[in-house]
Amino acid sequence: MKRIIASIMLLLGAVGFTQTIEGPNLIKTREAKKLAKKFLRKQGITGMSISVSQHGELIWSQGFGYSNRKEKIRVKPDTTIFRIASISKSITAVALARLANDKLIDLDSSIYKYVPEYPKHNYDFTIRQLGGNLAGIRHYKDNVEYALNKKMSITEGLDLFKNDDLLYEPGTHYNYSSFGYVLLSEAIQKATQTPFETLVTDSIFKPLKMTHTMADVSDAEIPNLTQFYRSSALKKRIIAKPVANEYKVAGGGFLSTSEDIVKFGNELIFPKILSEKAIAEITTSQCLITGERTGYGIGFSCEKSVNDTPKFYHTGGGVGASSILMVFPKEEVVITVLTNLTGVTMTDFGKELENVFVN
């Protein structure tokens, strides 16, 4: 009998010890799952993928809903491929940081050093200002430009805006601009004499083992690619119209999985391809000429977390896509959410997940 009691006590102790070790993450993921399901229902999202890492390891990765509703194909966080929209700017920023670190691009040199044929305007501006949305390049002027279905190269895409006046003297205002990243990618490929997509694949995707990340090529057959949805006038979810993102790959044209984007986010915490100086270049808020912080470095918004620690993030919105990437270096946490629906506001949901996993 004593042996039996001792065995039971030992077993209970082991169970208690296991719960102590696993408890916090189990509690967090359970709470996050409830929030995710509520968010999915409220926003009417067809499919969503969420991946979270802590200390470099995945602690939660889950798909919700469908990548293809008609065929009842479920979302899988390791293989379902989404448009990541403007998280693409963060990828471009890392590519730029590597080039700056290797002295192949000078962030504070004029854009005309790398793209001398770009039309002259009233003011000059630098690579750094371009990446920080301070150059005065305009954004999309309407939904037609935003959802343009005309396949163009990066160089051809410059024709959409290159002859337009700058919105202001560079450095005096902040104006978010995806077109600015088209010009930035042109500067990158001119400086390196390498196609932008090839450069990013070789310098980022391959070394970080982002095997499900690629450019969105409109006529390519891509396995595990989600359908892309939008809301109709009657608030039903219908398939979005085709869009050609080739020319704006740097600002919003990459495809990926949530698990691949977590690998990418961890580069800011556990660098493999960037130096600490290179990371600082893109995650330090730029300032207007008045000294006012913009809250944006290059390809990353730079704020404080709920713990008053550094938070680097980017949201994305594209045709059939709404997304967010958040990186918390102090806590060593990365959170990524990808969806296949146009027009979902991701910021508030991102903060809910931050409160769960970072607070």
Image (tube, rainbow, N blue to C red):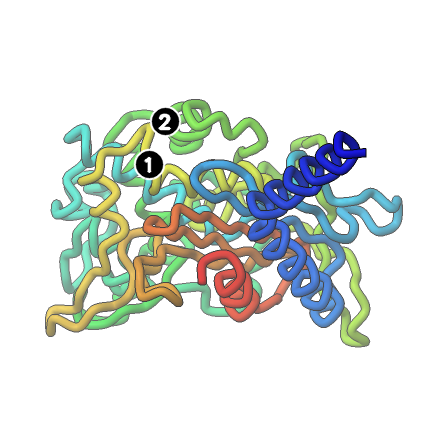
Judged from this view, the residue extending furthest toward the front is 2
Q: Nearer the viewer, residue 129 or 296?
A: 296
Q: Is residue 244 visible?
A: no
At 32% from the left and 64% from the top, the residue drawn is 303
Residue 341 location, quadrant: bottom right
Amino acid at dot 2: Ser
Residue highlighted by disc 2: 203
Q: Do the residues under discs 1 and 2 have CB atoms within 8 angstroms?
A: yes
Residue 95 location, quadrant: top left
Residues packed near mark 2 inside 10 Å, few (<14), some (14 to 19) or many (20 plus): some
Q: What element carries label 1?
A: helix
Residues packed near mark 1 inside 10 Å, few (<14), some (14 to 19) or many (20 plus): many
Residue highlighted by disc 1: 95
Q: What element carries label 2?
A: helix
Q: Nearer the viewer, residue 89 or 152?
A: 89
Query: Marks 1 and 2, Cα distance to the nearest angstrom?
Result: 7 Å
Horizontal side, residue 294 vs residue 48: left or right: left
At 70% from the left and 40% from the top, the residue drawn is 9
Query: Horizontal and vertical percent for residue 128?
Result: 20, 51
Amino acid at dot 1: Ala
Question: Would you place residue 133 above or below residue 116 in this image?
Answer: below
At 72% from the left and 72% from the top, the residue drawn is 42
Question: Would you place residue 240 above or below residue 250 in this image?
Answer: below
Query: Horizontal and vertical percent for residue 259?
Result: 57, 39
Mark 1 or 2 closer to N-term?
1
Quarter containing the C terminus: bottom left
Query: Horizontal and vertical percent for residue 18?
Result: 62, 41
Horizontal side, residue 122 vs residue 72: left or right: left
Q: Is residue 175 visible?
A: yes
Q: How many labels does the image show?
A: 2
At 73% from the left and 52% from the top, the residue drawn is 64
